[in-house]
Amino acid sequence: MTRSRVRLGVNIDHVATVRNARGGAHPDPLRAALLAVEAGADGITAHLREDRRHIRDSDMDGLKNQLKVPLNFEMAATDEMMTIALRVKPHACCLVPEKRAERTTEGGLDVIVGQHHLQPYIARLNAAGIRVSLFIAPDAEQIRMARTLSAPVIELHTGTYCHAFDDGRTDEVRQELARLQQGAELAASLGLEVHAGHGLNFGSVGPIAAFPEIAELNIGHFLVGEAIFSGLPAAIGSMRTAIDAARP
Ligand code: PXP
């Protein structure tokens, strides 16, 4: 397989987290998204959560109306989100699990348990011309089910790997990287496009970007945090460099 350039999707959820801390309009996630695109983001990702803790409905409309790059709408597979997705018509919908109590998306979507609900749900999005991605753990049965459910894309959950990486647990890092690599290989062999994300930073991104099957990485929290120190364009530029360096 040839190593093409990996697309970088910048997740702007946590710009909205800071905005919402004061209830006003600043910092504006749309302004951050436009700046991210100027700095080299290939797409923008935003997660409209059920509880609207960061991104709001009006943010999704603004992003859709003003962005000239693909918008990746992360959402739970609920009726409410389907209605919004069909109105906003993003380039892609990434279906994620969502439990109100969790701080972020802690685990992958269980597409085996949810298969009967997901099959018609994915079919509706496919019929609307929205590219469906399933955010799943690098588990062979989950990946095979994603194929069965006719999702064209999976996004591999890198959270466990990133936690181990950040804590310096090297055996677990090796183990998780092997799982992710096998998952990426299996998915590509089934004809699925492979994305990855969650918890990635300048250090942990390289080994994931090095998998030849990876077409896109979605990164948010670290970039928004790093922007405090270096500014968003510099943070995105350094991430781009780290990704490209991993793909000789
Ligand atoms: N991909 C998916 C499906 C996610 O849910 C998230 C978190 O919202 C990310 C990528 C980005 O994770 P992070 O903000 O940790 O970079």
Image (cartoon, grey):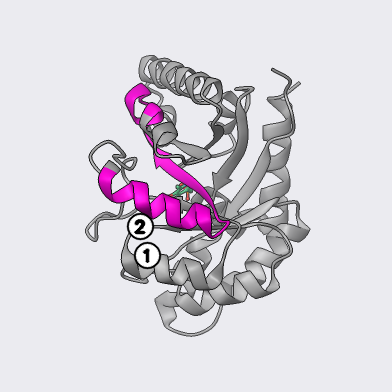
Q: Residue at x 45, y 71 (%)?
A: 84
Give the x, y percent position of residue 211. Answer: 60, 22
**Most foreground residue, 235 or 247:** 247
User: In the rendered structure, does residue 119 fall within the stretch colored magenta?
Assistant: yes
Dot label at residue 76:
2
Could you classify mark 2 by the number of other residues whose Cα lies within 10 Å: few (under 14), some (14-19), or many (20 or more)?
Answer: many
Q: Residue placed at 56% from the left, 76% from the top?
A: 61
Residue 213: x %, y % from top left: 60, 25
Q: How many marks?
A: 2
102 horizontally vs 205: left or right: left
Amino acid identity at mark 2: Ala
Quarter of the rendering containing residue 178: top left
Q: Is residue 55 visible?
A: no
**Residue pointed to by mark 1:** 49
Magenta-drawn segment: 116-144
Quadrant containing the C terminus is top right
The residue at the point 56 percent across, 27 percent down is 191
Indicate which label's residue lies in the foreground, 2 or 1. Answer: 2
| Residue contact at pointers 2 and 1, CB within 8 angstroms | yes
Label 2's element?
loop
Q: Quadrant of residue 238?
A: top right
Expressed as whole percent of the image width and height from the top left, the position of residue 196 reads 51, 37
